[in-house]
Amino acid sequence: MSGEMATGPWEESAPKRAARLDLFKFVPFRLNRLAAEVSSALSAEYAVRYGLDIPEWRVLATLGFRHDACSAQYIAHCTRTHKSTISRAVTSLMKREIIERVENEEDRREFRLQLTRKGVALYEELIPRLLRREQEILSCLSAQERKDFARLLGKIEDSLDLVQTSEEADAKQAY
């Protein structure tokens, strides 16, 4: 064996040279690039037609799949988006009457967020479009590959202690 066999993104071309990182084999780079491309493809569905940016979409999506109101802190935690970014998105969506604040029954000093009727209508119109776009993006994978991909993503998310369901998020912290 020549000793030049690379097993990962770090390669060394000569014994005296420092190891070099091949970005195209480096998983964090690949995941970030993939996420950016997929996000861009999906944002085309909601940005032009509905005037939503990515943080606004994250707020709308989080509120849309929940059965009850939640805090902006909950949305920030679930989406891994900075709370100031979520706060700006909330303000914008409230001005457009897509979401509204409701009093927290347990703590009247705190407000929770929920979709308005207009927000629900927007969510229900947008979701089928996004699901179709997701299927187009994943169409290069077989059904088994899609299952494997989802399972592997779940394993990575779990190893990083990322919430994967609203029930899990509810159980981890009170929002």
Image (cartoon, rainbow, N blue to C red):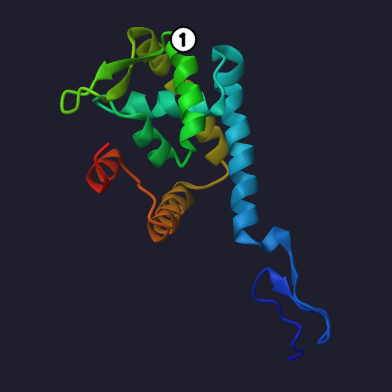
In this rendering, the answer to whether 171 lies above or below 137 is below
Please state if 26 lies on the left or on the right of 106 as rendered: right
Task: Name the residue located 41 percent from the left edge and 8 percent from the top edge.
Answer: 97
Q: Name the residue located 83 percent from the left edge and 86 percent from the top edge.
A: 16
- The quarter of the picture where residue 102 lies is top left
Inspect the image, locate mark 1, and give the three-letter code of the amino acid beneath it.
Lys
Q: What percent of the width, then of the height, locates residue 158? A: 38, 57
Give the farthest residue toward the front: 109
Label 1, on which residue?
A: 95
Q: Does residue 133 appear in this view? A: yes
- Residue plotted at (58% across, 26% down): 43
Q: Name above or below for residue 84 compared with residue 141.
A: above
Residue 77 lies, in percent from the top left, at 39, 41
Residue found at x 50% / y 34% = 135
Q: Is residue 80 left or right of residue 25?
A: left
Q: Is residue 167 left or right of residue 151?
A: left
Residue 161 location (% of width, % of height): 38, 56
Number of other residues with Cα within 10 Å of mark 1, as a class: few under 14, some 14 to 19, many 20 or more: few
Q: In the displayed structure, would residue 112 be above or below residue 148?
A: above
- Classify residue 160 as left or right of residue 111: right
**Which quadrant holds residue 14?**
bottom right
Residue 34 picture location, percent across and down: 61, 45
Question: Where the N terminus falls, by quadrant?
Answer: bottom right
Query: Quarter of the image containing the C terminus?
Result: top left
